[in-house]
Image (tube, rainbow, N blue to C red):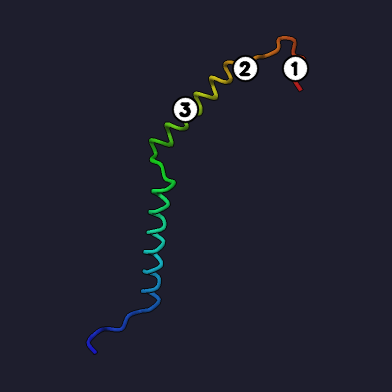
């Protein structure tokens, strides 16, 4: 018997970490976006919100407010 004994807890934790990493990588491919993509989406949403607010009709008599 020339092999040194292995720590089963350490082996189990290493296996669990590898599985979690593989799952995380799969989720990153499936759902992930780069920072540039997130910033671009936020900028587009803000621009659309401002455009919508700019075209909002405001009743000059003030009767339409609740």
Q: Which residue is mark 1?
A: 64
| Residue shown at 75% from the left, 10% from the top | 61
| Residue shown at 74% from the left, 19% from the top | 65
Q: Residues within 10 Å of mark 3 (few under 14, many from 20)?
A: few
Q: Which of the image's four quarters has the N terminus? A: bottom left
Q: Which residue is mark 3?
A: 44
Q: CA distance from mark 1 to mark 3?
A: 30 Å
User: Where residue 29 sits in the image (x, y, percent)?
Assistant: 38, 48
User: Where residue 64 sits in the image (x, y, percent)?
Assistant: 75, 17
Q: Residues within 10 Å of mark 2 (few under 14, many from 20)?
A: few
Q: Secondary structure at mark 3?
A: helix
Q: CA distance from mark 3 to mark 2?
A: 18 Å
Q: Earlier in the sequence, mark 3 or mark 2?
A: 3
Q: Earlier in the sequence, mark 1 or mark 2?
A: 2
When asked about the image quadrant of residue 56, the answer is top right
- Relative placement, left or right, of 36 versus 60 is left
Q: Secondary structure at mark 1?
A: loop
| Residue shown at 39% from the left, 63% from the top | 19
Q: Which residue is mark 2?
A: 56
| Residue shown at 74% from the left, 13% from the top | 62
- Nearer-the-camera pick, 26 or 57: 26
Q: Earlier in the sequence, mark 1 or mark 3?
A: 3
Q: Secondary structure at mark 2?
A: loop
Which disc number belongs to residue 8? none
Residue 43 vertical placement versus 31 (above, below): above
Residue 54 vertical placement versus 41 (above, below): above
Residue farthest toward the bottom in the current orientation of the protein? 1
Residue farthest toward the left in the current orientation of the protein? 2
User: Where residue 6 sits in the image (x, y, percent)?
Assistant: 32, 80
């Amino acid at each position: 018997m020339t092999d040194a004994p292995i720590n089963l807890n350490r082996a189990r934790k290493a296996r669990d970490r590898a599985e979690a990493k593989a799952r995380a990588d799969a989720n990153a491919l499936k759902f992930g976006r780069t920072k540039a993509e997130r910033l671009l989406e936020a900028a587009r949403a803000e621009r659309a919100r401002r455009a919508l607010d700019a075209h909002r009709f405001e009743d000059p008599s003030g009767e339409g407010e609740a």
